[in-house]
Image: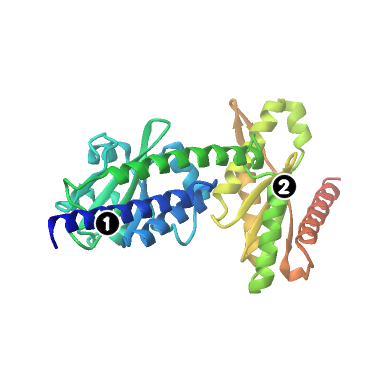
Amino acid sequence: MNDLEKIVAALEKNQEIAQKFFEIETSVLSILNFRDFLEKLLTEIQKKRNIPYVWISLIEGSDIACMIQKSASSEILNGRTNFIAKGAFLALINNSIDPVLVNDNLKAFQALLPQQYKNRLQSLAVTPLTLDGEIIGSLNSGDDSAFRYKPGMGTTLLKQLATIVSLCLSNVMAHEKLNILASRDPLTQLINRRVLEQILSREFERALRYKTQLAVVFLDVDDFKIINDRYGHKAGDCVLAYIAHNLLSMTRGSDVVARFAGDEFVIVLPSTSLDKASELVYRLKSFFADRPLDFEGIPITVSISCGLSCMEYGVSDAGTLLKKADAMLYKAKKHKSTRRS
């Protein structure tokens, strides 16, 4: 092959690489949620560029890291997103937005690697990502070959990809924030009734399809009006936020906790039997009974009533499951009232 043929071959190769980068970029431009965006981005890079290891790293505690941790969980992303302290990350990239290519002393980059990739990579490309001008993490590619990424190689296409990805992340984050505002109760930050009903319907269909169990707890605050009248609405708000916080901390990541209306809350418990759901209800009642809320130095006793429903009752749809739990709550409240009188 003469020099001209070599030049033409190199140009064709570069054009092929540029085309693949373009295809990656266009494949994610219209996606407006973190999970789908990251899944598409990582799988497309891996497929189009034939790269064995592709993942994203984010600075711990950043707004985008927190949002992705909450909303972007999936089998594809499991192990392909990792979180790193800000100081350690900025030191690795020399506080620069320029891509870093390494094929030597990869031990220095261990904090950047997901657990399953450690001791396997021979070369690494770290491409910093920004959000509104601030470095928030990196898009990373690794290879078994020490020759895939070497210091001194051109990084123009990586920089271009980082620019597109950063713009997309900004769009996705703005869209996700709007979704949160529309789907969350502003006081407790729990999902609202509309979203709860959508999730419950989905979980009900899933339980039917896979013949698994599903339980629902409907609960409210005893004497909530008295708390508001005696201590003021600020105290009432604190009680609701206190309950919401502890409902979240005492349930599993797969459970769904929602503010239904007023002082009413609903917990959806996938793959949970009536007995297990009853155990949770007992723990919740005991927890609040033993731990008054400290409101500006004043202890406020918090008592809850609960109604429970589950697939074992033979209900026909998600709405009936919820209504059954509500009816059981009404029954529990009536029983408490009778005992008091």
- Residue 31, numbered circle: none
In the figure, 135 relative to 41: above or below? above
Residue at figure coordinates x 75%, y 39% from the top left: 262
Q: Is residue 7 left or right of residue 29?
A: left
Residue 77's image quarter? bottom left
Compared to residue 104, the image places residue 185 above or below, namely above
- Report the residue at 67% width, 40% height from top: 302
Task: Using the rendered image of the protein, determine whether residue 265 is visible from the camera's viewpoint.
Answer: no
Circle 1 SS class? helix
Residue at label 1?
A: 13
State the residue in front, 124 or 277.
124
Q: Amino acid at mark 1?
A: Lys
Q: 282 or 322, which is in the foreground?
A: 322
Q: Amino acid at mark 2?
A: Arg
Answer few, some or many: residues within 10 Å of disc 2's Cα (few below 14, many 20 plus, some between 14 and 19): few
Q: In the displayed structure, does residue 141 sit left or right of residue 185? A: left
Label 1 Cα crowd, 10 Å radius (few <14 / some 14-19 / many 20+)? few
Q: Pick the quarter of the image with the N terminus.
A: bottom left
Residue at screen point 63% across, 73% down: 210
Give the image quarter of residue 236. top right
How many numbered markers are drawn? 2
Which coloring applies here? rainbow
- Mark 2, residue position: 194
Q: In the rendering, at what x and y percent does residue 76 appear?
A: 45, 61
Residue 167 rendering spot, x and y as whole percentages = 45, 38
Looking at the image, which residue is at 39% across and 58% down?
Answer: 79
